[in-house]
Image (cartoon, grey):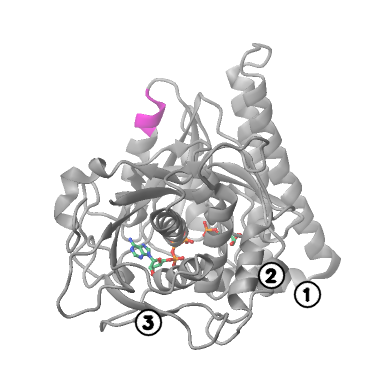
Amino acid sequence: MATAVSAPGKVLLAGGYTVLDPACRGLVLALSARIHCVASPSLPSPSSPTAGRITVRSPQFQDAVWEYQVSPSDIDGAGVSVVQTNDGDGNPFVLTTLKYVLSYLSLPTPPSTTLTILADNPYYSQPPPPIPRFNNLPFPIKSAYKTGLGSSAALVTSLTSCLLLHFSPEHDKINNNKDGEEGGGEGLEKHILHNLAQTSHCAAQGKVGSGFDVAAATYGSCIYRRFPPSLLSTIPDPTTSPEFTKSLKNVINQRWETMECDPITLPEQIGLLMGDVQCGSSTPGMVKTVLNWRSNGGEEAEEVWKGLNSKNEALIAVIQGINNNSTDNNTSEKEEDESLTSHIHQIRATIRHLSAQTSVPIEPPTQTALLDSATALPGVIGGVVPGAGGYDAVCFLYRKNDGVEADLRRFLGEWKVENGVVKVLELGMEGGEGVRVEDVKGYADVKGYFEGVVEL
Ligand SMILES: Nc1ncnc2c1ncn2[C@@H]1O[C@H](COP(=O)(O)OP(=O)(O)OP(=O)(O)O)[C@@H](O)[C@H]1O
Ligand SMILES: C[C@@](O)(CCOP(=O)(O)O)CC(=O)O
């Protein structure tokens, strides 16, 4: 029997950098661009042993097959051993997730299994339409231009969930009840999926990001407050420590009480449009510089940081206010739009100040020109350079009135950037669904991608 799961991508509309601080919250929207993972028994192979052989394939890309042999560790209590057996580049996100999930399950010799990964098109810059679903890109993953939608977080979350469901005979679904609710319902609890995906993702990245991307991949759109970073530093080295498995299970099975992921959506009449500016940025370097500036900047830096956080909170409050008042007519659409526009402007002004203070191009001048010109179009409420900022993508909010989206698309299609024009990413906002189980029949149109498996 095959198991299929998908998890959504993200856009951090407000809270870039400040969300790294557990005292601050960020506004993250889950996107309809998903990464799918399908686990199926592998076809028997005369050259490999049947137990402990895991093959991971990402068939949209060149040379994207990773074969692993899984076996018990020589050290009692250490993580299971997962060794790549084929040549070529490794994939740290896949390897670490396998190691952590199989150790959590205490499964050192899983049955021979193939995991097929399929990513929706908006994660990477694409040729002009029409293109098929799960378009094939004729190069390795490392040569793909990412659009900043959190491919690694969606991948790790769907792979974690797929492995847990496929190898846990007691669960065939995900429990969608809110974590911690009394009388909780059946299925694999989301906080276990989340904690395990978050831990694997941080370990694979080699740094602890705020984790808003894994939270959105698991729980959907939310107002996010980071877990305490010290939580993960208690987990010792998986290869050498006899305490690894015990410590991992302990961290995964507890509730991460101070982390918050409160559901939120954009008001119904407000649309989201994202554009790929096709240049790319290096997030880790930008984060390091901003955090150093904060550590060394004394009271002045602290004031900017707090000011930015309170402006982010104010935007969140306006969105929640519009959502709560949607049935009373006291506030006109015009007033709502003006309030949103003004709050977005204030956040951007503080971000530009932060950019100037740190010399980090969070909202570089070329993006300022693009955002300001687009915001001047009728019905366009405002736009931001999301997340870490830079040159990956832009994100706009607009009123869903006749013609507004079409005008904005036309405008972006004519706006010149270094490598051409801004390309609209074909995606929308999702609500609070997050990671979900998929029907394997839904992949019938892309059967050719599923090599080496017994059945779909
Ligand atoms: N379709 C895929 N199949 C297998 N691995 C993938 C796939 N997409 C992404 N990855 C893994 O994720 C890595 C990219 O992760 P990275 O964190 O750099 O990007 P991202 O999560 O998309 O970016 P951002 O955090 O800026 O949104 C790739 O190098 C690869 O290891
Ligand atoms: C700068 C930061 O706050 C946001 C990065 O966002 P993105 O990956 O650029 O969407 C880092 C983080 O939260 O992990």
Please tell me in which quadrant of the rendered image residue 409 appears. top left
Cβ atoms under marks 2 and 3 closer than 8 Å: no
Please tell me in which quadrant of the rendered image residue 119 appears. bottom left
Q: Is residue 303 left or right of residue 313?
A: right
- What number is the disc on residue 291? 2
Identify the amino acid type marked 3: Val
Q: Residue at x 58, y 19 (%)?
A: 333
Residue 197 lies, in percent from the top left, at: 52, 60
- What number is the disc on residue 76? none
Mark 1 Cα within 10 Å, few/some/many (few <14, many 20+)? Answer: few
Segment tinted magenta in the rendering? 403-407
Q: Is label 2 or label 3 in front?
A: 3
Q: Is label 1 or label 3 in front?
A: 3
Q: Which residue is mark 1?
A: 296
Label 2: element kind: helix
Residue 380 lies, in percent from the top left, at: 49, 32
Q: Quadrant of ligand 1?
A: bottom left
Residue 169 position (above or below residue 262): below
Q: Residue at x 70, y 67 (%)?
A: 231
**Residue 130: in sight, yes or no?**
no
Cβ atoms under marks 1 and 3 closer than 8 Å: no
Q: Earlier in the sequence, mark 1 or mark 3?
A: 3
Identify the amino acid type marked 1: Asn
Q: Residue at x 56, y 52 (%)?
A: 215
Q: Which residue is mark 3?
A: 83
Residue 204 position (above or below residue 18): below
User: Is residue 141 magenta-colored?
Assistant: no
- Residues at marks 2 and 3, CA–CA distance in whole angstroms: 36 Å
